[in-house]
Amino acid sequence: MAQTKDKNYWVQLAESVTIPVDNIIDGKPVQASSGKTFTCISPIDGRVLAEIPSCSQADADAAVESARKAFDSGVWSQTAPVKRKKVLIKFADLILQHADELAILETLDMGKPIGDSTAIDIPATANCIRWNAEAIDKVYDEVAPTHPNELGLVTREPLGVVAAIVPWNFPLIMAAWKLGPALATGNSVVLKPSEKSPLTALRIGQLALDAGIPAGVLNVIAGFGKDAGEPLAKHMDVDGLVFTGSTAVGKHLLSLGATSNMKRTFVECGGKSPNIVFPDAPDLKAAAKAAAVGIFFNQGEVCTAGSRLLVHNAIKKEFIAEVVEAAKSLQPGHPLDPDTSMGAIVDQQQMSRVLGYVDKGTADGATIVAGGKQAMSESGGFYIEPTIFDDVTNQMTIAQEEIFGPVLSCIGFDSEEEAIAIANDTDYGLAAAIWTSDLARAHRVSRKVRAGSVWVNYYDAGDMTAPFGGFKQSGNGRDKSLHALEKYTELKATWMNLNY
């Protein structure tokens, strides 16, 4: 773990680690068929990490063909659940055995602090694979209540070939949320990581083979969305498409899935989550610290980030001051330092986008009370100060659009009804939090806020046992929990006449 290894250890590992540069198709490491590559740049200091194969239609076709062949052969889809469980548990074990390697790749590629990669991302990835593996031989089919002369069976069967397109902010965890239930239920998968952070996906493709997952069951192809992602979404031999990313891309993929072969398509998209603080919050200082972590964790590159802080006007001035104070301990630092709590923005493009929103907030009349500038520019990397806006109205751009960076919008309210109205005045519905000592209020507000996850007196809690997903334009379907298995299976009703 990062806590027992100093910065020198991680810097040395960063210099010696092998950067994965191969796709995995049909159990073999391969380059893009065109020979094209794209440059993988570390947001830590702007240095080139590797040239990564840039896949296209031909590579997507080859990966899908391999996945279909494996599925139809039954080498994975028709094996007993208990056997799939054992292989997936070994896969989880290998992820933990390679924890430092995967953690350094994640941090080098995406910019998150090494302490987060080791304490959160890698353990959560292994846990997700293991949890789904353990669950799969404990999920039963059904017998319908029928006349004694009939037998009605309700069974779940794997979809077939699943294309999983995952984002750059939590590359391994988001991949695991798809791979865990998809593989556990017997599907074959084509995984396409974001071109902004492809390294750990390429590495676990090989680890899956090492664990005993048969060739073709998990294929990994790198590349850009238009070149490699769209061909998967439009492919007539892909049965299911799962995606985590922006709402705009999610809508586009839904349309491609619908107009191709009506493949089962599930998208988990953006958020503009309200963090609502009432004057009777049990501990205002703790709430302020949680509000700061809720937006600045992972550099604000979190779909559930508490980017709208709704504070009762009776305590607003004092509370925002506490949030500003809490943000002082969350300043950007070198991502390979285990003491760093906030790392680099994923790339130059995203940094410019976030800073553009900062300019827009100021132009619209909001007041910067902390941050607002690029940081550590001398490093050659991409860093932004934790930024807090006061005097925000919910109609402002910074309160309505997902920034996906360390920018907090503070909005006042005077009543419970007004807080609920502001919270729901958004296209999104991914998450929300409520801070109050009034149990009745906690129930009332949590029921009325339209969000897939609601936390009371803390922020961003939960584990594999609860479903994750959103209302409205935050997407459809659910990741995590047994409910996730529904996305990767088809229900079949089989009726038997027992009169013969």
Image (cartoon, helix red, strand yellow):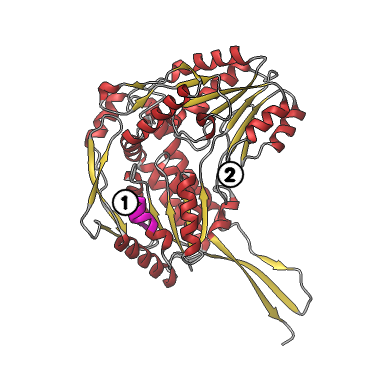
117 or 198: nearer the viewer: 198
The image quadrant that residue 498 belongs to is: bottom right
The image quadrant that residue 471 belongs to is: top right
Q: On the picture, is 194 further left or further right than 399?
A: left
Most extreme residue toward the right is 147
Which label belongs to residue 223?
Answer: 1
Question: Could you tell me which residue is drawn at 53 percent across and 59 percent down?
Answer: 488
Across and down, in percent, residue 378 comes to 25, 21
Query: In the rendered view, would you say 278 is above or below 155?
Result: above
Which label belongs to residue 470?
Answer: 2
Across and down, in percent, residue 285 comes to 59, 16
Query: Callout 1: helix, strand or loop?
Result: loop
- For the C terminus, the quadrant is bottom right
Task: Say whether residue 5 is magenta.
Answer: no
Q: On the picture, is 313 further left or further right than 28?
A: right
Question: Could you tell me which residue is drawn at 71 percent across and 32 percent down?
Answer: 445
Residue 347 appears in the picture as rendered: no
Q: Which residues are magenta?
A: 219-230
Residue 427 appears in the picture as rendered: yes
Task: Say whether residue 227 is magenta.
Answer: yes
Across and down, in percent, residue 80 comes to 51, 65
